Amino acid sequence: MSIAFVFPGQGSQYAGMGKDLYDNFSAVREIYESASDALGYDVAALSFNGPRDELDKTFRTQPCLLTASYAAFQVLSSEGIRPVCAAGHSLGEYSAVAAAGVIPFSEAVKLTEKRGMFMQEAVPAGRGLMAAVLGLDRDTVEKLCGSVESGYVSPANYNCPGQIVIAGERAAVEEAVSLAKEAGARRAVPLAVSVPSHCRLMEEASLKLAALLEGMDFNPPAIPLVNNADAAFLKDPAEIKDSLIRQLGSPLLWEDSVRLMIENSVDTFIEVGPGKVLAGLIKRIDPGVRILNVGDTDTLRETLKMLK
């Protein structure tokens, strides 16, 4: 058995995430205390109780989701489960970086809070938009984005076959949605996100992130990381730092990342953290692999049972 840990990104958050593990493991309570000390507010209270509109603010969502994922990782690790590699979807890449020991957890939560702020500041509210396009292949979506005349739009997330997210200026994304429907898309719908990530509108955020990361020390990862920007195995700290900077303004190559891991003998994926979004995507990429998840004590128990 060859296991990969994969960590969810923004959109998997919900009020109550992480609470079951918090209630049952003292190590998890310590993780939440560390996050609260680093950020200056009660991360457990916000994560468990909301309010939802506060939890959904990008600069709150990112560290809270990372904390929940890192807590699940620590519980799984304490059971002796060891992956051969790790990857994360967008924000989830920071969970993977922390889990691999590249940066301390307390630094990771502060970094994701700043990342969320930089992203929010980069594009004024209402100017950008993201949309999911279902049922069209890559070439069609790329050509469709290139034909838009009302502004900038480009593919942002290559999630799985037939599911591509586009991002850009609002009018351009809306035009691309109409064109996608005309081209036979099964669905093409705007997403309820406040920031158009993984496109060139994040250039300002990338520059700020680069300046922040310049002053941070990165360690070699304990396990290889598969990055979003290139879908490649990374082991060098400098490459990981550069990848996190490029990730904000580059298309997210999730399908390619999963295929790379499978090509390198991974046969079991464990989604570590809230929700099952990645499990659904991986199933569409390759229904032949085993997909598990750990977000609470029930799923932990079931995953350990399946691994024995």
Image (spheres, rainbow, N blue to C red):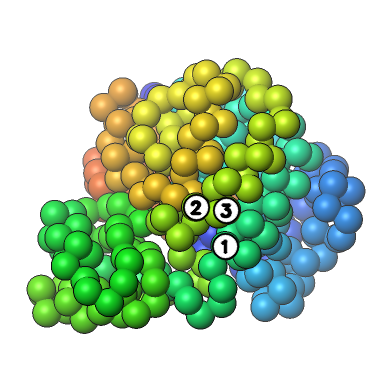
Q: Which residue is mark 1?
A: 122
Mark 3, other Cα within 10 Å: few <14 / some 14–19 / many ≥20:
many
Q: Earlier in the sequence, mark 2 or mark 1?
A: 1
Residue contact between numbered discs 2 and 3, judged by CB atoms under 8 Å: yes
Residue at (61% x, 65% y) in the render: 120
Q: Secondary structure at mark 1?
A: helix
Residue contact between numbered discs 3 and 1, judged by CB atoms under 8 Å: yes
Question: Percent from the top left, x then y, of residue 4?
Answer: 45, 32
Q: Amino acid at mark 3?
A: Ala
Give residue 259's quadrant in the image.
Answer: top left
| Residue 141 seen | no
Residue at (49% x, 52% y) in the render: 203
What is the quadrant of the N terminus in the image?
top left
Question: Percent from the top left, x then y, of residue 75?
Answer: 68, 38
Q: Which residue is mark 2?
A: 203
Residue 226 in the figure: left or right of residue 8: left
Give residue 104's quadrant in the image.
Answer: top right
